[in-house]
Amino acid sequence: MRALLGVYRELLADGIIPFWMKALDLEYGGVFSCMAEDGTVLSTEKYTWSQARMAWTLAALYNRFERRAEFLVHARITLDFLLANARDEQGRFVYRTTREGEPLEGATSIYSDCFVAYALGEYCRAVPDARLEWQRREILARVERRVTEPDFCETAPYALPSGRRVHGIPMMLTEVSGAALYPHTLMRHFVRPERRVVLEYLTRDYRELAGAEGSFVNPGHAIESMWFVIHWARRRGDRAMILRAAEVIRWHLEAGWDRDYGGIFLGIDAGGGEPFLSNSEKKVWWPHTEALYALLLCHKLTGEAWCLEWYWRVHEWSFAHFPMPEVGEWRQRLDRQGKPITELIALPVKDPFHLPRAALLITELLR
């Protein structure tokens, strides 16, 4: 474990931090994230998701890794950019802006709001600020009202047809809001013990949908969702929920692991059919980073041997395929065989979040 701590500390200090500090927009604030794998900027457009995630990462670096003033300075600049430019007349956060902050696409994704609230919460851990905390609460209150409305559909980059509920909403709010409603919604409705999966889509009254849409499973989302539940349960001393969530993580490693080529599939079908969303056979970086943290967290809290067995399987495959030593960051997209691809999946960004967050949380856990 001491050697593993050194691996992640080195990844942060010598790779992730230098890579992303070079990507900061020192003129207008925020970060350039529409880039090639090597960091070459392809567009100066700013997706609110990425900007808020960068603000969280910078604040978390200060809180959890090294108290360097520049981390907080740029976290605040990035938050100020978002609060000044990325809201519409109703206070909702838009999906993307120009480099200067002019809106290019409106409030098509409630996740933008959630990530801004997430970043504000991490920043206020380091710098208590009553005004920012009030804004965080206001953002979350608006999100929680909006997602209950019958016409809610703001889940870009993936469309949400009418009459549906999506796993990502209670998942995100479990970690960001802390309210008990959301982890219980996940465990009571989206977790399907008889099928040993977390379903991504349900009807408005939480029944299963017909066809491939109703049996679609995103293993990385399920794993991430369950460590959010574990965080919530740990704060409340709910060991039974911790054990349940850990077991759900195990289901998705067993179901989502490619037995031919290794790695975690982006999507699978609960019934063994063709997955609902395109690119499901691909291997992308973020499900693997979520699994790395989730498995070490589960091992710490349960002591069960399978956690470390799976950890090392995911670690060995991930560290053999994703790192780019000459760049410092990880490549984000591979084909099923584990070869690099440039095909666009979901958003045209290199994300300053999943790998940094996993490395930070693992470093904190091991330390």
Image: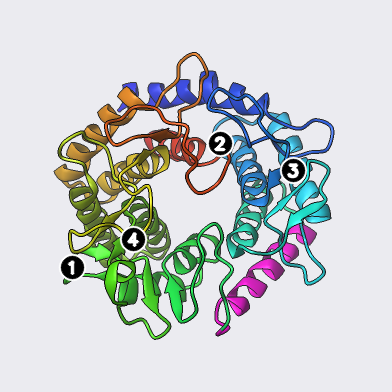
Q: Earlier in the sequence, mark 1 or mark 4?
A: 1
- For discs 2 and 4, the disc positioned in front in the rendered view: 4
User: How much space separates mark 2 and mark 1, taking CA atoms?
Assistant: 34 Å
Position of 88 compared to 201: left or right? right
Tag 1: amino acid:
Arg
- Give the magenta-colored segment's residue range: 130-150
Q: Earlier in the sequence, mark 2 or mark 3?
A: 3
Callout 1 secondary element: loop
- Rendered image quadrant of residue 337: top left
Provide the secondary structure element on which disc 2 rests: loop
Residue occupying the point 45% across, 16% down:
325
Point out the tag, 1 or 3, that comes first from the N-terminus. 3
Q: Look at mark 3 in the image and give the residue it sits on.
A: 78
Residue that mark 2 sits on: 350
At a point 31% along the width and 30% down the height, the residue shown is 338
Which quarter shows the N terminus?
top left
Q: Are marks 3 and 4 in contact (CB under 8 Å)?
A: no
Q: Which type of secondary structure does the marked residue at label 3 adopt? A: helix
Q: Nearer the viewer, mark 2 or mark 3?
A: 2
Going by the numbered disc 4, the residue's amino acid type is Phe
Q: CA distance from mark 1 to mark 3?
A: 43 Å
- Calculate the distance from the C-alpha at mark 2 to the C-alpha at mark 4: 24 Å
Q: Position of residue 19 (x, y in %)?
A: 59, 24
Q: Residue 48: where, in percent of width, then height?
A: 67, 51
Left or right placement of residue 163 versus residue 195 in this view: right
Q: Is residue 145 magenta?
A: yes
Between disc 3 and disc 4, the foreground one is: 4
Q: Earlier in the sequence, mark 3 or mark 4?
A: 3
Residue 123, percent from left and from top = 67, 48
